[in-house]
Structure formats: C-alpha cells, structure tokens
Image: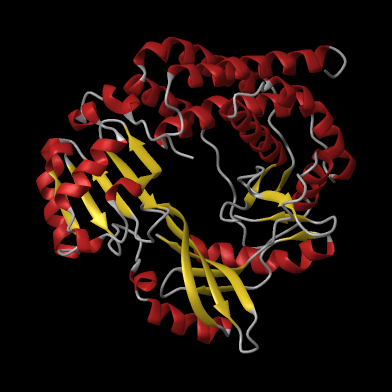
Amino acid sequence: MVNDDLSMFSADPVLTSLQDLSIENLRSGILKCVPPQLLDAPVPSYDVSNLRYSPGKKMVVGLTSDIGQKPISLRIFPRNNLEDRLAKAQRVHPDHSFLMDSMNAIAWVFPAERKINLDLVANHARLAQLLRRHRGYELCDVELMHFVPEHTYTARVIGTKSDGSLVREYIKIFADDQGEVTSRIMAELVPKLCDARIQIPDDISYLPAHRLLIQSEVLRDSSRTLSYRAAASALATFHGQSVDVAPQRTEDIDSDHATVLELVASVLPDELPVVRAASIAVQKALAESPPPTNTVLVHGDAHLGNLFPVAGSDVGVIDLDQVAWGWAEDDLASFFAFTIWLRLRKKQDPQLALRDLPHFVTIYNRYAENPVIVSTVYRRLANKLVAERVRRGIARGKISSAAQILDFVRIAEQCLAAARHAELGPTL
C-alpha cells in the first residue's frame, strides 16, 4: 500500500514542483486538466497506487480508483524538460495526454500509458476475442488489480464456459518482453512443482504481439494462515528445482547502497549520517563473510503475499516474474524483510520475526538439498532492510517519515549483532 501523503518528497532541490505535492493536489490537477468524459470515476476516488522516484530526474505516479477501471499515470519532471516531454507525449497520445502545468507534470489517461499498451484492455471486444480463441470462454468482466506505470498492468478477468460455469483468471500486460521469459519458466515448473504439492498457475498463455500473459488463478485458503513449516519447506522445495531458461541473478551491492544514500539525501537529508553508517556496517559485514556458494533457483520476491495456503496441505506460489538462479539466503531474507515491514506497518513488534529466523532456517535445512547458515541469512537480511526496504520504501512511496527509515536501520543493526552472536555461541 502506498502512502497518500507524498510531502516527504518535497525536499528534492531539482523537482521544485514537489514542494506542494500531495494526493489532494494531484486530484486537483487532474480535475483541472483532464476532460471528465475520459474518467469513469470521480476524481476524489483516485488514489496513488505506485510511485517510481528518481532524485533530480522525475517522479512517476500511478493513480487508480476502486470505483473505475481507468488508471492514470503522471510524469513529474524538472521544469526545463517539460516542454519537450509534453510534445513527445502528444505526438503519441494527442487525445489522452495533458499538461498539469502547476505541478510540472504530464498526465497519461487510460488507455494511454508511456510504455504499456493498454489498448487491448480498453477494447473489451478485442480482449474477449483473444480470450475466446486462446482460453475458450466468454469474457464477462475485467477488474483492475495492480497498475505499475512503465512496468505492468494486472487485472482479474471473469468469464463463462459453454456449460455456464464461471472462470476467474489473471491477465498481465508488460512494458517489455519479461512476460515471455516468465511464461517459459512457469511452463517448465508446473509439472515439477505439482508433484511437490506446490501450486502455481498451471494454465498459461503468452501472446507476444500484445506482451500479454494469461494465467489461471491459484485459490487462496482464507480460513488459515501460512505456517513457518509450510513456507520454509515450500522455499526449500522451490530451490531444489531446475529450469533451463531461468536467467542468472546479478548483484551490485555498491550500486544498491549508493542509490539508497542518494534517495535519503534527496528526501530526508537529516537522516543521511545514520543511514550512511548503517550502509557501511552492512557492506563491511558482507565483505568480511564468505558469500553463499550454492546457486539455486530462487523466487526473487518471496513473501507472504506471494506464498500462501491453498486447499489441503499445499502451498500456492504466484508472481514468478523474478525467478532466476541465485542464492537461497536471499529468498529467506526477502521473506523476513517483508514480514518485518508488515509488522512495522501494523505497529507490531518486529522482534518476534527476528527471534523466529533461526527456527525458520532449521525447518528450511530439514528439507533443503543445500543447507544455509543462520549467520549468513541474518547478514543478507540486514542488507535487504537497508539496500532494498529503505530504497524501495522511498522510491515507491511506501515510507513517509524518518521514523520508518530509522526502524529499518535499527533492525539491520540488530541483524548484524545476531549474525555475530550466531557464529560465536548458541543459536538465538
């Protein structure tokens, strides 16, 4: 969930238009510049769905509404780039791109989007024809689920088969060819994971001309939560798979931390010394410890939203766009980084997650072909908290205060201390 209050970004010295940035001003700008007939929901109903922030360069804002199905994407630029950007936008989308002069912003209104071709979902008859041809059912409804400007558009589609039964599936339109790689990986994984009682979408179609991925739904069992045993064993099983077409994950720790410091310096400069000290400590700890040696097939975005209980004792795994060859410890660290973020967001004590990590690793090692070391997972978790959670939190608008940044820094420091303790004495 993205914060509605965007005032944290007002410190950027280049994007002077951000001085008054808020959801109310965004709505006001839309109301003034976008013709009402292009909106199928009242302007106040639009809320920020996703941000992409680059210090001194631009901010990309995705707006969606629970009432309507037409997303809006904004590009906020430095003033000296605005005229060229507007001219380019209106050459491509003359009827659906508009200047929000007071905010140095250009608005792309559905079905326009700078990088994603949304004409397909704007034209239900065309989408219905594709679903009829490739999936064998009649389209009834399209419900927007997730919109990330310049990246992906995800929707749930509901249809009916010839026997009258309902079908619920998901479509995802990509800005690049990632959907083709994802579809090939999923096709290889389906028979392997089915035998291991892990459910992923088992019916996949990819239409390269539209960069459209269509996939069956994995039904969540909402009556129960995912246990550590189920999550750890599912990750261990996933890591034991092999996929020929999976790419190799690369890591650039120096670059990641440099980006974090640039972001903090731009939006919360007073906190820069604290974050810099934590960044140095994390990088030093990683440099002084041997890196993980066993490359496995990692999910790439393992967390409680993408791993969940399904019927029986199976585990559902979705969102396979980042599957690659990498380190198991990073998937475990991602799982706990998300858990910590979730507990902080709910104003719960994150210490329970830290205390549970050794137990989680023990369960994982019971099922894994290549066991991992607790201290290494702690260090990778510290890195995730600083180099990923702080970075993504600012760049995507999911952190709205200095206190939230300092929470991640404090917990990262505790992770490094726990790693040292695990090496010197009994497991915590």
Q: How many marks on residues?
A: 0
Report the front residue among 2 and 428: 2
Report the front residue among 176 and 156: 156
214 to the left or right of 18: right
Give the quarter of the image for residue 58.
top left
Q: Position of residue 21 (x, y in %)?
A: 26, 32
Q: Residue at x 49, y 27 (%)?
A: 390
Q: Position of residue 290 (x, y in %)?
A: 70, 26
Q: Residue at x 68, y 19 (%)?
A: 415
Residue 253 in sight: no
385 to the left or right of 317: left
Q: Which residue is drawn at 26% across and 43% down?
A: 27
Q: Where is residue 187 in the image (x, y as percent from the top left)?
A: 66, 69
Quarter holding the C terminus is top right
225 to the left or right of 84: right
Q: Where is residue 337 in the image (x, y as percent from the top left)?
A: 63, 32
Determine whether 128 is above or below 282 in the image: below
Report the front residue among 224 and 320: 224
Give the quarter of the image for residue 385.
top right
- Farthest residue to the bottom: give it: 162
The color scheme shown is secondary structure
229 to the left or right of 302: right
Residue 193 in sight: yes
Q: Residue at x 63, y 46 (%)?
A: 305
